[in-house]
Amino acid sequence: MSLILIAIALGIPVVITILLLRRFSKEPSSHEDYLLEKIRELEGRIKALEDEMF
């Protein structure tokens, strides 16, 4: 019984750490890349509109 409690007590922080690392290691870079791509697209649109006006 006590071995099961020890295994659970040691396993929970490991599982939480793995889940947190997966969440924070992948998402920011993909979101940043997506936002940078959209910013570049908008800059291109702005430049095209400016060229049309002048």
Image (cartoon, rainbow, N blue to C red):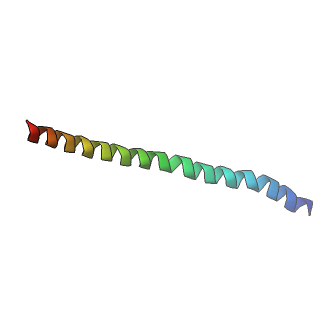
Residue at screen point 49% across, 50% down? 26
Which quadrant would residue 7 be assigned to in this image? Answer: bottom right
Which residue ends up furthest to the left in the rendered image? 54
Residue at screen point 85% across, 56% down? 6
Q: Position of residue 39 (x, y in %)?
A: 31, 42
Residue 35 relative to residue 22: left or right: left
Numbered-mark total? 0
Residue at screen point 14% across, 38% down? 50
Q: Position of residue 53 (x, y in %)?
A: 10, 39
Which residue ends up furthest to the front in the rendered image? 53
Residue 30 relative to residue 17: left or right: left
Residue at screen point 88% across, 60% down? 3
Q: Quadrant of the N terminus?
A: bottom right
Q: Position of residue 9 (x, y in %)?
A: 81, 54
Which residue occupies the foreground of this view, 22 or 7?
Answer: 22
Which quadrant would residue 4 be assigned to in this image? Answer: bottom right
Which residue occupies the foreground of this view, 27 or 45?
Answer: 45
Q: Position of residue 45 (x, y in %)?
A: 20, 45
